[in-house]
Amino acid sequence: MILFEKKGKANTSETVEATVKRAKELGIKHLVVASCTGETAQQYIGCGLNIICVTHHVGFRNPGEDELSQENRLLFQKEGIKVLTTTHLLAGVDRALRLKHQGVYPAEIIADTLRMFGQGAKVCVEIAVMALDAGLIPYGDEIIAVGGTGTGVDTGMVLTPAHSTHIFQTNIKEIICMPRGH
């Protein structure tokens, strides 16, 4: 396990290298990576794995704005990288309720609990379940999930995700890398 001294984009190259290496050691075929603009997902091109790039939903930053350019969508299509752009599992409607009514809702409690391990750990679980629910990875297989804190990636995990309706059956098997503190 790699523990980075600091969180953030500076760890991206080492995270990409470590997660691809671990996938090959374990015979894992599927890697799900959080990448809003596609910059991080591009680093996995040619690695020999089934790559699923999970982006922010359209309108995350600004109404109607898609952070992943059409150019990158076309590149990923050409390279065989699947792209998932949809509502975030642990935000979405619960976040809307919190913003409007100032409460705390179940999905956000799950998200905050996972954040105790760091933002990247929360992202890893969230995107893995989202990819499974979208049918982009097979049910019951160990996969690698890669997430981060802000931009770039700094966290990689081996896990077997469960569908969102059974999220608590998600099995985190190992942490490949993560920041030491957050």
Image (cartoon, grey):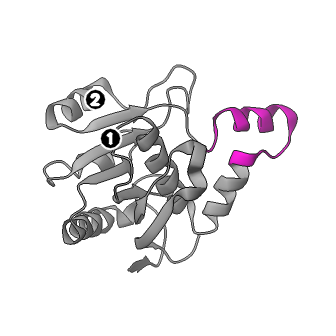
Percent of width and height locating residue 66: 44, 26
Quarter containing the C terminus = bottom right
Q: Taken as a whole, is the magenta stretch helix, strand or loop? A: helix
Residue placed farthest to the top in the image? 64
**In the visual, does 86 lie left or right of 25?**
right
Q: Is residue 15 visible?
A: yes
Bounds of the magenta segment: 90-107
Point out the tag, 1 or 2, that comes first from the N-terminus.
Answer: 1
Does 137 sit above or below residue 182? above
Label for residue 138? Answer: none
Magenta span contains residue 92: yes
Identify the residue at horizontal 48%, vertical 37% (top origin): 56
**In the visual, does 56 lie left or right of 92?**
left
Q: Which residue is mark 1?
A: 38
**Element type at mark 2:** helix
Magenta span contains residue 88: no
Percent of width and height locating residue 172: 48, 66
Q: Which residue is mark 2?
A: 73
